[in-house]
Amino acid sequence: MGQRPGSSLEEVLEVFEVFASGSLTDEVYVLDDVAGKRIAIAPRELKDKYRRG
C-alpha cells in the first residue's frame, strides 16, 4: 500500500471486492473464481483502514 498511496484495497489486491472477516487477524485470502470474479477476504481492521468513501 505504501507504494500506491490513495489506492483502494481492491485495486492493490487486483480483486473485484474485499470482504471483511472478524476472525482473521493477519492474513488475506484471495479466491480466484467466485461466481466468475476474483475476490479477497481480509481482516476487518485492514478493510476498515483502507475503506474509501
Image (cartoon, rainbow, N blue to C red):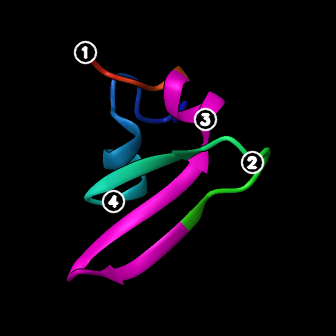
Q: CA distance from mark 3 to mark 4?
A: 18 Å
Q: Which residues are magenta?
A: 30-48
**Does the magenta stretch mainly form a helix, a strand or a loop?**
strand
Instruction: Report x, y in % for residue 18.
Output: 40, 50
Q: Which mark is residue 13?
A: none
Q: Amino acid at mark 2?
A: Ser
The residue wearing badge 1 is 53
* Residue density around tag 2, few if under 14, some if 14–19, many if 20 or more, within 10 Å: few
Q: CA distance from mark 3 to mark 1?
A: 16 Å
Image mark count: 4
The residue wearing badge 2 is 23
Asked if residue 19 lies in the magenta stretch, the reply is no
The secondary structure type at the circle numbered 1 is loop
Which of the two discs, 4 and 1, sits closer to the camera?
1
Which of the two discs, 3 and 4, sits closer to the camera?
3
The secondary structure type at the circle numbered 2 is loop
The secondary structure type at the circle numbered 4 is loop
> Residue at image x 59%, y 66%?
29
Which of the two discs, 4 and 2, sits closer to the camera?
2
Instruction: Report x, y in % for residue 27.
Output: 72, 55
**Quadrant housing residue 49:** top right
The residue wearing badge 3 is 44
Q: Amino acid at mark 1?
A: Gly
**41 lies above or below 20:** below
The residue wearing badge 4 is 14
* Residue density around tag 3, few if under 14, some if 14–19, many if 20 or more, within 10 Å: some
Q: Earlier in the sequence, mark 1 or mark 2?
A: 2
Of residues 13 and 41, the one drawn nearer to the viewer in this rendering? 41
The secondary structure type at the circle numbered 3 is helix
